Amino acid sequence: MNFEEIKKLDSQYGAETFSRFPVALAGGQGATLVDTEGKRYIDFGAGIAVNIFGVNDEEWKSAVIDQLGKIQHTSNLYYVEPQARLMELLCKRTGAKRVFFGNSGAEANECAFKAARKYSYDKYGAGRSKIISLKNSFHGRTLFTLTATGQDVFHRYFHPFVGDVVSVDANIESVRKEAKGACAVVIEPVQGESGVTALNAEFVKALEKFCKEQDVLLIVDEVQTGNGRTGKFHAYEHFGISPDLVTTAKGIAGGLPLGACLFFEKTEHVFSAGDHGSTFGGNPVCCAGAVNVISRLTDEFLLEVQGKSDYMRAKLRTIDGVKAVTGMGLMIGLETEKPAKEVANECLKRGLLVLTAHTRVRLLPPLNITKNEIDEGLSVLKEVLK
Ligand SMILES: *Cc1c(COP(=O)(O)O)cnc(C)c1O
């Protein structure tokens, strides 16, 4: 099918939830993609931080295909090897004690929120169920995670929302005001969807202290920032904090749907059989992809990510029309003189895929993007922004 044929079917039959860029992607190699009309693009988006090793990565593909040839799904009624191996890898890498697998970021957060409420209920009884999130956060599209998403644009139409969830300004006084009845605070180390803004380090340290003192769980949403994106395995490592629950998804399986909630010391035994579940969660094909991804995110590889980030950021700062460069690692926000949407559309026409986040241009390239691909993408941005 060509682009017009695909677009026609989508317009006619798709739920009208997405405003898509006018392109149908068909394939590619690494961070270089090709559309149905044979046009080439440099990919600075990675399918929203998902395709960690770009597309068509040989090693990842063979891990996935190998599992696909054995068994594609088992349900969680049975044990299956790639899931067990991934649990071990994630725990050894992060110091977490246990892992629960879902299929998405929203489900990972849903699991963490439920775990936090149960932790508090088991220990203190009812009346301590409040989840505190931050203004300008994004935690997902299920009703619970949407309630915790601190952006009013997402809070239309769907009332009533989940009770006892509040969003506060990102300062410790505002969190303290909501301390009564709270069981958890959830943060994104770098707020992604609202514009690629890193949290203030002093605030994050103060928050960790507050949480420890009050026995309020600290949940870190690493759905976008995790899996090497910021140059550390998880972005909270930049802040030197120890969370109680960590959620991850997007990049974890290199392009397959998988989410995970990591339980640290305090929350290790919060769930028992029947408390939570998922039919697809921890699917063996997705887990095989994730085992490949996680085992390749070595310290050496993460240093390369940091190097690429430094290189891109230094170049971006010299580009006319760039007012500020935000974020961490290869999670880059650009405040531009031209409106972000216009920049994204212009880049697309010239063969570069970039994303937007609120008023900023957002760059989330595959972590294995080559220097040539970076240079090619940056030269398009330079043209567009001037
Ligand atoms: C994308 C995202 C989510 C939601 O993930 P889905 O897989 O779309 O459900 C949650 N939290 C953060 C920080 C995200 O960036």
Image: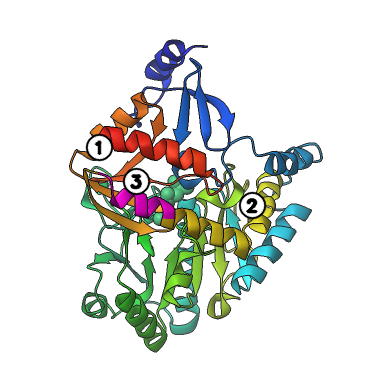
Residue at the (36%, 54%) spot, across then down = 314
Q: Is residue 257 left or right of residue 128?
A: right
Query: Mark 3, mark 1: which one is toward the viewer?
Result: 1
Q: Is label 2 within 8 A of ligand 1 (CB to nearest ligand atom)?
A: no
Magenta stretch: residue 318 in it?
Answer: yes
Where's residue 40, x and y in %?
A: 48, 24
Q: Report the amino acid beneath label 2.
A: Val
Which range is magenta? 311-319
Residue sitting at the far bottom: 213
Q: Is residue 57 visible?
A: yes
What is the basis of the colouring in this image?
Answer: rainbow
Viewport quadrant of the C terminus:
top left
Against 201, residue 8 (above or below) is above
Q: Which residue is mark 2?
A: 293
**Mark pair 3, 1: CA separation:** 14 Å
Q: Which residue is mark 3?
A: 362
Q: Are marks 2 and 1 in contact (CB under 8 Å)?
A: no
- In this figure, what is the number of numbered marks? 3
Q: Earlier in the sequence, mark 3 or mark 2?
A: 2
Q: Are marks 3 and 1 in contact (CB under 8 Å)?
A: no
Residue at the (56%, 40%) spot, across then down = 54
Q: Is residue 313 left or right of residue 288?
A: left
| Residue 181 picture quarter | bottom left
Against 176, residue 45 (above or below) is above
Q: Earlier in the sequence, mark 3 or mark 1?
A: 3
Is residue 298 or residue 190 the one in the foreground? 298
Q: Which residue is mark 1?
A: 385
Q: Residues within 10 Å of mark 2 (few under 14, many from 20)?
A: many
